Amino acid sequence: MSGIYRFPILPLPWIPSAPRKDFQMYGRSRLFRRIYLVLRTSDVREVLANDSGRSAAFSVADYGDHMRETVGDFFLGLDQTAGNSYDVEKELALKAFLAETIHGSDAFEALRADLTEIVRQETAAAVQSLETVSRREIDVVSDLANKVPVRLVERYFGIPDRDGSLLQDCQEISFYIFNFFSELPGIRALFRVRRRARKAGARLRENVGREVMERWKILRGPSGPPRPQHVLDRLLLSDPTPKDEKEHLDRVRRTLTGLISGALVATVGQFVSAVDRLMDLPADDRRALQYAALAAAHRGNPRPLWNQLREASRFGAVPPFLFRRCRRPFKIARGSAREKTVFPGDLVVVSPMFAGRDPFTFQDPLAFNPLRPDSSYLLFGYGLHACIGAFFGEILMVQMAAQLFMLRGLERNRERGRSVSYRGAPQSFVLNFLPAQPPLGV
């Protein structure tokens, strides 16, 4: 197998059943002279591992440009180069996001337990609210995946969704930021994508900025700062007496906006995609899934359910593509038959979606096997710019799935469409269940 495909020859319809020979590496075509698509898992890791350090071969500057247009400068859109603020801003975000400067596993596990309980409460409330009105259906998108993460953003990040636009704004922004087609010239539809993303970014920056200012006034009140309650407080109190207050508040706003927009959309999309795949499991596997849900919800053992979700997620990775701009000549898959040299300015697109079906990494790649080794997966990226909130997404997905799959009689709704309805982001995915029956294990 090679591992780099050339545009525009890529035959997308064969994704579900791609034979081994199709995992090859295309060079540059005449139409798109500077684009490579990298599919093989080992090559994807090689590219993502070489976007860090002072002599990195690849740059995330294109992401940075998109972020600057929408949410503002954010460290995941910065290269780690001398003189920039990458290291400082990443450390600030990690301290705030993870509650403290975490050096020991005990502190991290305490944070995980707190987050798990918040998500469990919100998810159980969302599901139980449907049962109380005797509904026999649940929309996985609107009743669960769009609701619970937004409540977590309010309770953990300290940013309430006052006008109901938070998730939609984040979706518009992320679609633009993570869409490598935005880098292709002359595609008219992309101007509309960019325009919507910029409007959504302006609205999100304004809303987050207002919360930052109001909370700053409270923390600077005459009674002194209270004990930090959430990420917003921890960011603000990272420098309680800043030399440049305006710059400090702007950095807090940018960091919060980047964290929220990144954490929400990928988790929502990945969860819905995974549930869609899990609903296709045969009866015996579905029973195992129900018991895994019970173990996560009531026995404090999320691992079996996470294994199921992670395996389901590789069939529809979100986002399906990541891209990097080449900074210096670099040989991908050096020494192999698929070796390709990319040059400065070339756009290198790696695909976690295709890598999830790589027959050289996954034995029998179209089979569902939740016992595959951890090292096989690329669910939250790889390398320096991997998602810093991977554990956050894992907790959200596990607890939402636990409450969902404990419902009895869960099946696809045949009248309202058996599959997920998409319009960019997931819009609807209706499942039937039996509210008259108690959840499994009760």
Image (tube, rainbow, N blue to C red):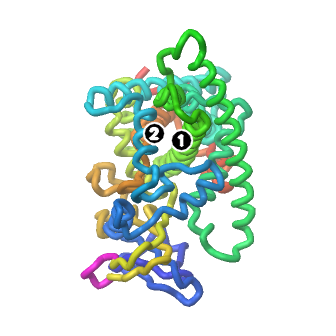
- Magenta span of residues: 332-338
Q: Quadrant of residue 377?
A: bottom left
| Residue 333 within the magenta-colored segment of the rendering | yes
x and y percentages locating residue 124 in the rendered image = 52, 25
Name the residue tied to disc 1.
Answer: 255
Mark 2 vs mark 1, CA separation in Å:
7 Å
The image's mark for residue 117 is none
Q: Quadrant of the N terminus?
A: bottom left
Q: Is residue 224 above or below residue 212?
A: above
Considering depth in this image, is 305 or 348 the residue closer to the camera? 348
Q: Quadrant of residue 368?
A: bottom left
Three-letter amino acid code of the residue under disc 1: Thr
Horizontal side of residue 90 vs 170, given as left or right: left
Do we see residue 336 in this rendering? yes
- Identify the residue at horizontal 52%, vertical 81% (top origin): 34
- Identify the residue at horizontal 59%, vertical 54% (top origin): 67
Q: Is residue 181 above or below residue 408?
A: below
Name the residue tied to disc 2.
Answer: 93
- Identify the residue at horizontal 42%, vertical 54% (top origin): 385
Q: Main secondary structure of the magenta part?
A: loop
Rate crowding at label 1 as few (under 14), some (14 to 19) or many (20 or more) other CA atoms within 10 Å. many
Q: Quadrant of the C terminus?
A: top left
Element assignment for label 1: helix
Do we see residue 44 in this rendering? no
x and y percentages locating residue 65 in the rendered image = 58, 60
| Residue 150 within the magenta-colored segment of the rendering | no
